[in-house]
Amino acid sequence: KEIGRANVAVLEETFPVAMKTANYLSGGQTLEDAAARLSAINKANIKGPWNLSFSWSAAFQLPLLELCKGKEGALQLDAMSKLYIEELKIASAASKGEYSCTEGGGDHKGERKRKLED
């Protein structure tokens, strides 16, 4: 929720309303983390006129490629099709702020490198 509110606050202060969309890069996030974060952003986007989404390529492609590992180049078309449809359902729900994740899903898990002084 905090990530969503922070992103929308920045957009409301800096992003022109004439721009109809903003696409974030998934940047190696898992599909689940990206979906949880995008859903939180879209839930927080109450008054903004923007379509907010991700450029999903890495989040979609990496799990599909994992299905082919160790298969000596053989494409697992049935399994890939099923997984792709599931991924699209997740992305669709996230784009509408309707993705349900586990408690803490999408939370930032970065480490603080140094202690901030008051």
Image (tube, helix red, strand yellow):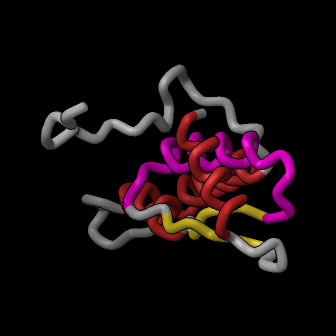
Q: Is residue 66 left or right of residue 100?
A: left
Image coordinates of residue 83 in percent, x first then y, are: 58, 51
Q: Quadrant of residue 54?
A: bottom right
Residue nearest the viewer, comparing 81 with 115: 115
> Relative to 98, does residue 71 appear above or below in the rendering?
below
The answer to if 109 sits in the magenta stretch is no
Q: Depth check: give the residue in front, 74 or 111.
A: 111
Image side of residue 104 versus residue 37, left or right:
left
What x and y, as percent, mark residue 97? 75, 42
Front in this rendered view, residue 72 or 90: 90
Q: Residue furthest front?
A: 118
Residue displayed at 41% across by 64% down: 27
Residue extending furthest toward the bottom: 18
On screen, residue 15 above or below 31: below
Asked if one can make out residue 82 in the rendered structure from this viewpoint, the answer is: no
Query: Residue at the spot x=25%, y=31% of the render?
Result: 118
From this viewpoint, is residue 84 visible?
yes
Q: Which quadrant of the figure has residue 44? A: top right
The residue lying at 56 percent from left, 66 percent from top is 24
Q: Is residue 10 above or below residue 96?
A: below
Quadrant containing the N terminus in the rendered view: top right
Marks counted in the figure total 0
> Start and end of the magenta stretch?
28-50
Left or right: 5 as drawn, with respect to 19: left
- At x 65%, y 51%, the residue is 9
Q: Is residue 38 left or right of residue 18?
A: left
Instruction: Please tell me which residue lies in front, 16 or 57.
Output: 16
Residue 37 rendering spot, x and y as whole percentages: 57, 44
**Name of the residue lying farthest toward the top:** 103
Residue 34 in magenta stretch:
yes
Magenta stretch, main secondary structure class: helix
